[in-house]
Image (cartoon, helix red, strand yellow):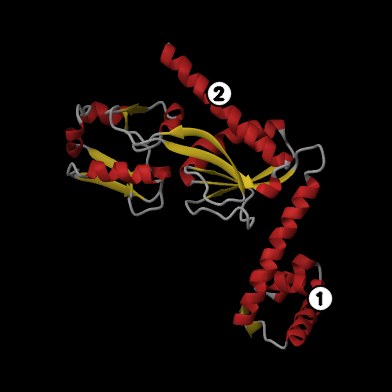
Amino acid sequence: MDWDKLRIFHAVADAGSLTHAGDVLHLSQSAVSRQVRALEESLNATLFHRHARGLILTEQGELLFDATRAMAKRLDAAAARIRDSEEEVFGQLRVTTTIGLGTLWLAPRLPKLYEQYPDLNIELMLEERVLDLPMREADVAIRMKEPSQADLIRKKLMAVRMQLFASKEYLELNGHPAAIEDIGEHRLVCQNTNSPQVGASSNLVGHLMTYDVKSTLMVNNYFGVLQAVANYLSQDFPNLVRVLPDVQSVEVPVYLAYPEELRHSKRISAFRDFVQEEIIAYRKQMKDQSVS
């Protein structure tokens, strides 16, 4: 198969339109259409269903698009390695992590990274789904569990525990729970146990619910759950007060991971060092506060 025709097919399949693909490729719609038609003839297969609103892949088209998508990701990886042979840190770095960690902890700290590397472009991909790093869905991940894939480089950044917090205003109105048994008389805000989350959080919430909590608010991610948030966030939200300090989850490891093929990436190294420095600074701040 002709590489150029495959490139054009991939652009059309990705855009769902001959016109949009032509804009991306800087080709006329007729030129794109001719190339796709020639590819279909060489394969003796129909790759698209054509209708007034655009193009839809046929079953054969889906098979070919899966192949060209994998090729594109491998080419992106090769291009990244070539760019990383330079001394300067620049270009795009796709970082994936959970919604809570990315929004509440990582994003506010990224301006410091941009001060060091103004030509670095971060694409922050926040979702609970674990993206496939070897397939280049992202370049680097920060996750609250050890990655299971063998072809990844991983580094344990820290360990956190899920704990209970309340706002100062809430405690002034409702009082402090003195024991775990008192939790049933308070309003509990937590992540829904059916939502994607680390097992330690789910287990803690399940345990709390055994005390017949009468008033609850279930949220589908950590972003809206500051009362049941991990301890690394309490430093950033001084209005939160920890309650029932004996109640907490088991330790949850936090790992940074990236594909083996990006081992020598200067963008990855810059981001890894930045995250580690931020964690060290946080630990020092926490230690200084405990002493004072």
Q: Secondary structure at mark 1?
A: loop
Q: Which of these two is toward me, 272 or 48? A: 272
The answer to whether residue 70 is above or below residue 281 is: below
Tell whether label 2 touches label 1 (CB within 8 Å).
no
Task: Give how far across and how far down residue 28 sits, in percent.
Answer: 81, 74
Dividing the picture into quadrants, the one containing residue 160 is top left
The mark that comes first in sequence, 1 or 2, is 1
The residue tagged 1 is 2
Q: Which of these two is toward me, 65 or 52? A: 65
Where residue 281 is drawn, which disc sits there?
A: 2
Image quadrant in which the C terminus is located: top left
What residue appears at the point 34 percent right and 54 percent down from the top-left corner?
A: 194
How crowded pointer 2 is (Cα within 10 Å; few <14, some 14-19, many 20+) is rated as: few
Task: Give how far across and how far down residue 260 sits, in percent.
Answer: 66, 48
Mark whose residue sits in front, 1 or 2: 1
Q: Residue furthest top?
A: 292
Q: How many marks?
A: 2
